[in-house]
Amino acid sequence: MGGPDMAPQTPQRSARPGEAVARLVRRAVLACALLVAGTPHDVTLKIYPGARHGFDRLQPGPRVYLGHTLERHPKAAIDAEEQVQRFLARYLVR
């Protein structure tokens, strides 16, 4: 089951909570890179600083769901929608 890189690790406490989040983001980006390595397709990973989970939701205001804050981020939502439209136009419309 998995190699040494997949072994569970003990969370490290940090004096600054942002460091733990940054570590998680770096791991997520690495995991994405490993998943797409070798694919012949173009892959784009875009991170929207300041955007929370559910950044494209239509309801105004934040909402906490299962301990996670969902909140619309208008600039990120607009950009993500434009990127999806370009992708669909490029690959599905012939």
Image: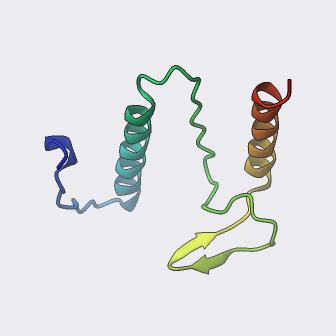
- Which residue appears farthest toward the left when viewing the image? 4
- Which residue appears farthest toward the front when viewing the image? 94
Residue 38: percent from left, percent from top: 42, 22
Tell me if residue 57 comes above or below residue 34 in the rendering. below
At x 66%, y 78%, the residue is 63
At x 52%, y 19%, the residue is 40
Residue 50: percent from left, percent from top: 62, 53
Residue 69: percent from left, percent from top: 59, 72
At x 40%, y 49%, the residue is 22
Q: Quadrant of residue 65?
A: bottom right
Tell me if residue 83 comes above or below residue 77 in the rendering. above
Quadrant holding the C terminus: top right
Compared across the picture, whether 13 is left or right of 31 comes to left
Compared across the picture, whether 37 is left or right of 49 comes to left
Q: Quadrant of residue 8?
A: bottom left
Compared across the picture, whether 67 is left or right of 85 comes to left
Please tell me how many numbered marks the rendered image carries: 0
Q: How is the image coloured?
A: rainbow
Compared across the picture, whether 24 is left or right of 8 comes to right
- Which residue appears farthest toward the top when viewing the image? 40
Residue 54: percent from left, percent from top: 66, 63
Tell me if residue 72 comes above or below residue 62 in the rendering. above
At x 60%, y 47%, the residue is 49
